[in-house]
Image (cartoon, grey):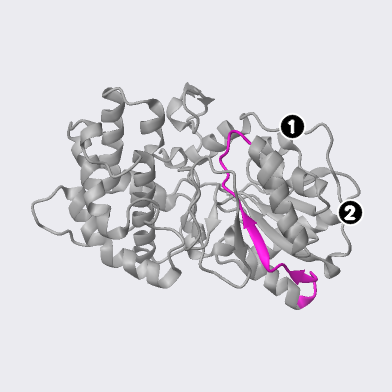
Amino acid sequence: MSTLAHVLEEAGLATITLGIVRGQLESTAPPRGLFVDFPLGRPLGKPGDADFQHRVLAAGFAMLERTEPGIEVFDEAIPDEGGLMACPIPPRDDSDVHPAVAEARGLRPAYDRAIARYGERIGAFRVVGPDDIPAAIGTFAAVAGGAAWKEAGIPGIPARVVQDIRGYYEAAALSLSDHVPAAFEATRWFQHETEAGKAILDARKQMEAQGAKQGLWQYLVSGAAAD
Amino acid sequence: MAVHAELSSTPNVVVMTDLSKPSSDRVKEFMNGLEAAEFDETAFTTPKPLSDSTVAILTSAALHHPEQAQFDPRDTSFRQIEAGRRDFKLGHWSQDVDQVGFAIDYNVVFPIDRLDELAEQGVIGAVSDVHLAYAGNQFEVSGVRMDSGPEGAKVLLDAGVDVVVLTPV
């Protein structure tokens, strides 16, 4: 990000760079860097809070008055409280399938409601669409149960498939909760509270045990929601 | 303190980190230590008054409109985001980015509505018709520095942009 600020400024554009990772901002030293101590993924701080977002922008635009490069710090931090989203999961399909597959089927109405309300800004669109999410989860459940990961039918690079599964669950979560979740609350819910999340964690351990390359199993989880 | 390798977003990197801190903070600590591009000199453009300036957003969130190609994990190209549209998808590949905030309110990453409001108030001169999205989480930025970055700058200059707000995720 800060690299682009240097490039744009060299081309004659004035830039303001918001930075969430202070060390990166300081190392790359963009012409005007505003350190915002916010969660990764929320550089304007608070979703749904226009006043707060305007404060961030105002602090950035004020840096246009500078006469030399520099980094400033926004005056309010948003800490990660480590919260967990409370999502009542709808009753599952009671057919004879893995609980994670049944769970995903049961979440489909909630997913559809979220997409209808917010648009498909997040969700299942990278590799696996919503219709195929339960089956994709089934492949990870199979690996978790001991199947060879290369033969389980995972429908793409495992981490990419998991991004879609996570997007499906996190979108659905928006329909199952009555508040704006803090950063990573929904991810923690998915990763630690759902059958799908548990299956993926177990599949990850199995892939490692089966000798898969680290880059293939490592990205199956969010480190930011590791606990 | 404990060795905690699983948090690393980079393969084969072991991080010493304080496990008493929230895991998202530990990820940021890890990212603090990643090698970053360094510039011997810092270019510095003095803009015209903000109230006369056209402002664009450049985000590294890998946003794209539905009909545009998705970003590959090591994709250093950019997508042009149209100012009048709100149908964008979050294509960033990192698992360590909160996505739900963007789902609820895209302005938390791409503050296009806020810029529209500032233009209406006369705080900024105008909102650019075109904005840019790149894919962050890149460990090799020479392509951005030498090719797609200058190409993006030209797009913005051709659109009459004076000031760019860069937002990461």
User: In the figure, B53 relative to A76: above or below?
Assistant: below
Relative to A125, is A74 on the left or the right? right
What residue is rendered at 25% in x and 32% in y? A150
Q: Residue at x 79, y 69 (%)?
A: B124
- Is residue B159 part of the magenta span, yes or no? no
Magenta stretch bounds: B121-141
- The residue most toward the right is A67
Residue farthest to the left, as pictured: A96
Judge by depth and name the residue closer to the eye, B58 or B26: B58
- The residue labelled by disc 1 is B38
Q: For the residues marked 1 and 2, what is the alpha-carbon distance in whole angstroms?
A: 22 Å
**Discs 1 and 2 share one subunit:** yes
**A167 left or right, relative to B86:** left
Amino acid type, residue under disc 1 in the picture: Glu
Q: Position of residue A146 (x, y in %)?
A: 18, 31
Residue A79, above or below A120: above
Dot 2 amino acid type: Thr
Q: Residue at x 82, y 31 (%)?
A: B40
Residue B13 location in percent, x, y? 50, 23
Q: Chain of mark 2?
A: B
The image position of residue B136, as x and y in percent, is 58, 44
* Residue B30 seen anywhere in this rendered image of the structure: yes
Disc 2 marks which residue?
A: B46
Q: Main secondary structure of the magenta part?
A: loop
Residue A35 can be seen, yes or no: no
Residue B139 is one of the magenta-drawn residues: yes
Q: Quadrant of residue A46?
A: bottom right
Mark 2 element type:
loop
Please name whichever residue, A19 or B158, is drawn nearer the observer in this view of the structure: B158
- As drawn, the residue found furthest toward the bottom would be B120
At x 27%, y 47%, the residue is: A196
Q: Secondary structure at mark 1?
A: loop
